[in-house]
Image: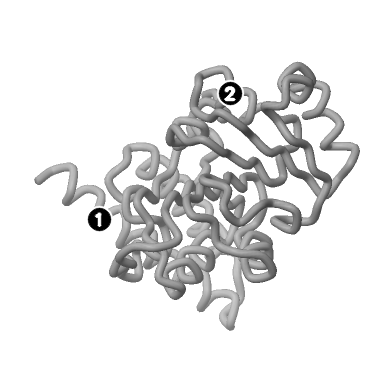
Amino acid sequence: MDRIAELCAYIDACYTFADVGCDHGYCTQYALERGLCRRAIIADVSAKSLSKAEKLLSGHIASGAVLSVCCDGLDDIPEDTEQVLIAGMGGEEIIKILSRGFIPRKFIFQPMKNAPLLRRYLISRGCNITRDDVFGDDKFYFVIKGTRQGAAPDYDELEYAFGRDSLKNPAFARYAATELNKKLSYLGGCDEGSDSSSLRREIALLKGAIERYERKTNS
């Protein structure tokens, strides 16, 4: 599985694109080389990481197609940037970035953990989540795509936990089965108490999600 290609498949054609926490700059390179954007901003809080992206995209920087900024989150990203990608951070970290800065007009977020918190944050602020899916084989990645304005979707508990589109994706079935086995194993070695209560709730959610997936695919 090519994580970059899978993630970049969520990018819409746009004039301006920003990759926040760009690391090596591969997503920006993908967008530029496929004509998905006219201009791009690469940003990272780490000057060392940003230098890797600057090296990769040196030709585009020289031509003026790419602007490189070393900043924390969205601090130096223009609010009128058409589409913003934030990938490879935790959901809580993405929420902090958005709370301190702004919610982009169009966004693609790939949280490494705490995706349910991010979904609740976005929906509570009236964002329209247009796609909420998962991809992967051995390792799985949730992707939340949407717009700052629009009709906020009415999510139920399972959709907050795993994403609306994930629940009909074969990749999710593999993810859920793997996670369920792990948590059942943890529960077997866990003392009764708050930890076991949390595990039981997570197990119940996973079982409910698997049942919904099977209903959707068999209907």
Residue 162 position (above or below residue 56)? below
Image coords of residue 10 (percent x, y) = 44, 37
- Here the colouring is one colour
At label 2, counting other C-alpha atoms closer than 10 Å, the crowd grade (few under 14, some 14-19, many 20 or more) is some
Question: In the figure, residue 201 lies in which quadrant?
Answer: bottom left
Tell which residue pokes out farthest to the right in this image. 48
**Mark before the other along the chain sequence, 2 or 1:** 2
Image coords of residue 23 (percent x, y) = 75, 37
At label 1, counting other C-alpha atoms closer than 10 Å, the crowd grade (few under 14, some 14-19, many 20 or more) is few
Residue 91 position (above or below residue 21)? below
Q: Are marks 2 and 1 in contact (CB under 8 Å)?
A: no
Image coords of residue 100 (percent x, y) = 69, 69
Question: In the figure, residue 60 lies in which quadrant?
Answer: top right
Please give left or right for residue 23 compared with residue 99 in the image: right
Give me the C-alpha separation between circle 2 and circle 1.
Answer: 41 Å
Label 2 vs label 1, nearer the camera:
2
Question: For numbered disc 2, what is the local secondary structure?
Answer: helix
Residue matched to label 2: 32
Residue matched to label 1: 211
The residue that appears at 58% across and 52% down in the rendered structure is 111
Tag of residue 12: none
Task: Indicate the amino acid at tag 1.
Answer: Glu
The residue that appears at 58% across and 23% down in the rendered structure is 32
Tell which residue pokes out farthest to the left in this image. 219
Please give left or right for residue 165 compared with residue 77 in the image: left
Task: Indicate the amino acid at tag 2.
Answer: Leu
Question: For numbered disc 1, what is the local secondary structure?
Answer: helix
